[in-house]
Image (spheres, rainbow, N blue to C red):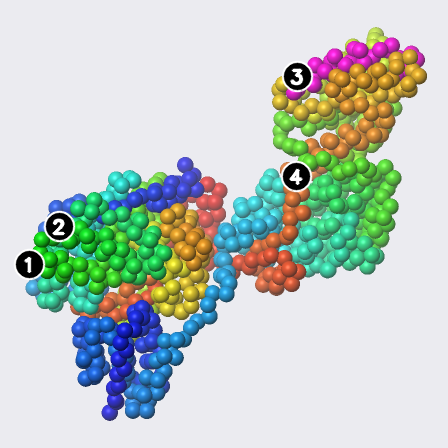
Amino acid sequence: MNIEQANQQAVERMMEARPVLVGIGTARDVIPGMRDNLLLHAGAPITWERASGPMRGAITGALILEGKASSEAEAQQLVESGEIELEPCHHHNAVGPMAGVTSASMAVYIVEDKTYGGLAYSNLNEGYGKVLRYGAYSEEVINRLTWMTETMAPVLKAAIEASGGIDIKALLAEALHMGDEGHNRNKAGSILYLKALAPHVARTCSDSSVAGDVLQAIGDNALSVLNPVMAACKAMADAAHGIEGSTIVSTMARNGTDFGIRVSGLGDQWFTAPVGTPQGLYFPNFTADDASGDIGDSTITETIGIGGFAMATAPAIVTFVSGTPKDALNTTMEMYEINYTEHKYFTMPQLDFRGTPTGIDIRKVVETGITPRVNTGIAHKEAGVGQIGAGLVRPPMACFEQALIAYAEKYGI
Amino acid sequence: MPITKTEIRRGAYYDSIILMQLQAGLADLDGIENVGVMMGTEANKALLTQTNLLTDEAKSALPDDLIIAVQGQDEATVSTALSQIDKLLAKRHSVIEEMDYLPQSIEAATKMLPSANWVLISVPGRYAAGVAREALRFDKHVFLYSDNVSAEDELSLKHEAAEKGLLVMGADCGTAIVNGVGLGFANQIRRGPIGVVGASGTGLQQVTARIHQLGSGITHALGTGGRDLSEQMGAITARQSLDLLSRDPNTQVIVLISKPPAKGVADSLLRLARSSGKPVVVNFIGYQPPAEIHGIQFARTLDHAAELAVMLAKQPMPGLSRGKPVESAPSTGKDGQARYLRGLFSGGTLAYEALLILQEYLPLVYSNAPLDRAYKLSDSLVSQQHTIVDLGEDEFTVGRLHPMMDNSLRIQRLQQEANDPEVAVILLDVVLGHGAHADPVSELAPVIGAALAQADEAGRNLKIVALVCGTNEDPQDMSAQIEMLQQAGAYVETNNETAVRYVGQKLQGLNPTSGLAPVSLEMLDQPLAAINVGLESFTASLQTQEAQVIHVNWRPPAGGNQKLMDILARMKKK
């Protein structure tokens, strides 16, 4: 099989995967390899020493939630002593936005790829403000997480199971025609998610007050579908991973310190380089000086062809790319240069229903000097502050250059 | 002491991004210290409290209310800022007029302009070959303006292009005019009947300009690059171009200009020119022309070349360019496919004249009695490529009657040729009259019929052409002989020149005269559409000429990192 055939197979699998949200479970019960002394986190492997502020804060919060620590210092001691281990979500078929920290007792979404049979997992979205994924771990954060695990998750689990599964691929395709790009803007998708859940919540939840709280939490949070979407993207990316000879990127993820990529034909090796700081718009009183390095597994959306790559279809957030709808179109046009194909199912009305750029090809990235464009939230660099803005970022070119050299070595080129 | 003022807007929905943009716009105004633009949720109010932006008015806002809080030096500054809200919210960027994206790779450009048939390359020489390879990968013809391309690269590009039936003009090609559109440096030249092939940019310009001045015009002017006619390049592009123009029905006269080519290259080009079937004017600047070659006129200067071409276009040379252009190009050229001529003559002079006329159509024809000793059959009993055999030569008549009387040798040879899958056309003469066989066709026709049937069965396209030399008063009854031949499936002519030219044209279509994969004539007919990589002025020039063009915003591959460039180049071969 030559490179073209391998890449063709990889993108076919990426596009033909059909991720369906089938349920919710407890991390320790459902995520492969999950254990009580393990925390999953976003991006490539990281140590406490190298971890960014938000990552340390999220680790601390998760350990507080698990009743293992009560302060950052204690958390540090547990992690540095090796008593608590850190491993990437990506090593466990999982993904998580921003810090992505997932602990054993947390509830997680279960997404099943109905075409190839793969499973993928993601934690539940907490909403805005002070949240664990941005490194906040105050009491209200922990209380919210506890409510999510104890109250919200069982209601959602029953509703999802009663629905027979929610087809996230179809939901995404629809949301892309409603102004979402699937990464930073998930307003339409979250409403579609609410619509899919609501009748089943009403039928399965006997406590109408709780049902109301849960539906409100889903409806108020324009990112509520982000986590199932990310798990769905993970399932699609995994379907394309491990094709011998392929130069297609199958993972892009940030741990707040390093940007890491993996390539379909290069096994589980990470290619990392220091993350950049996103360019974007900030909440009142915050500036770029407050921003943490780029963080989160949510770049799994760009990895499979949406998010920043589908900018043309999300005119409501074009201000991220300097302002005009034309710039949004140009962003997508630029991404066509480095992607292997155009998505069969994810289309954009603004480009006459052309498919989104899909399947980042390391050859094209290195050759053209164009790196992927990623839409992202911006975290404060200190633990506990939370989100301070949103914007755009690009991975460092070095990741792709290293991968190309590794490919040449592995395949004797 | 800074002051804070708040404006509350009810029932207004704005995407949060618009609000953040409004906030940024207000914060940019002179004298403004802090701004909060948010919906009036409890969480947002808490945020405003932290930043001292929560006025009493804002405290009473509901979740669906938009709070705009502005803090500044003084009352006037803040009020001015608040008055800007509507203007800032209404600020519209230009709507999408048209796509203005400049692609950064040839691949992206091909998707944006799928009709592009040419790629113009004027990037620094070090990168030019790589860009040209990319263009060939997408099946585009290449106008390679860049210089400092190594000879090895140029040769490999030309070979690759020739295999795909594509042209690489250059390297260091300054001028070409394709279908009325000038590439690189070119004059505005009227369309007309003259096709030009030039290895010299200014030579091409001078000749085409002079043709225009003399009231005539050109079909196309194809550049080759100065190095094309060197021994090493073997005139690949010039040969392709000559072949292309010889097949182009609109080109009536061909001009070939170059600085003096290498000797061997000159000979092969002249042989090709002679077989183009069209009058050719050659100006190998400063070259001593050999003795007159049929069909070729040597010009002393560029201007003289133009004058000769214009004159020839008005009065085509007798005997040349007759008849219709070759029929639609049949399947051509691949090994093993039928493309060769076998002429089986009983009349020596008829064979000799056939060889003379075929020079205008075919680069070389073998014979047992060739015009040039270099093309003598090594074994008269075995044909090679295109062959004309005079079966009346002494070597065949030892102990046997002359083939005008005895058909046995010809029948045997006819069967032999018809069985050769590489044979496309068999030409034979049937000489009637006193002394000749009393009814030659009665013996030949069954063999012809069987050969055609057998070829047909094998899916081969075999043609048998018979020249009948005789009169209606001959003892054999010419009409009856012709009728029998036609019934057997042969194409019959009674005039040698007509028969040979018919055969010549047929074979020309099957045999690109350059010996290379033919460049499709469609390329000349389609409106020129190009991808330009390099000098922006070339894009502007094409736009001025109303040709479709897309400019590639080119950067050195892999940022010019040689190690990565080498890996990428090797991966492309995998």
The residue indicated by pointer 3 is B454
Q: Residues at badges 1 and 2 in contact (C-beta under 8 Å)?
A: no
Residue type pointed to by label 2? Thr
In the image, which is nearer the foreground, mark 3 or mark 2? 2
Query: Of A15 and A73, which appears nearest the observer?
Result: A15
Residue A52, by quadrant, is: bottom left
Have a look at marks 3 and 2 and say if they share a chain.
no
Residue type pointed to by label 3? Gln
The residue indicated by pointer 2 is A204
Please name the residue shown 85% across and 27% down the image: B496
In the image, which is nearer the foreground, mark 3 or mark 4? 3
The residue indicated by pointer 4 is B518
Chain bearing tag 1 is: A
Query: How far across and down, in percent of the image, does residue B401 sit?
Result: 85, 9
> Mark 3 or 4 closer to N-term?
3
Region rendered in magenta: B432-456
In the image, which is nearer the foreground, mark 1 or mark 3? 3
Say which element carries label 4.
loop
The residue indicated by pointer 1 is A67
Residue A238: in sight, yes or no?
no
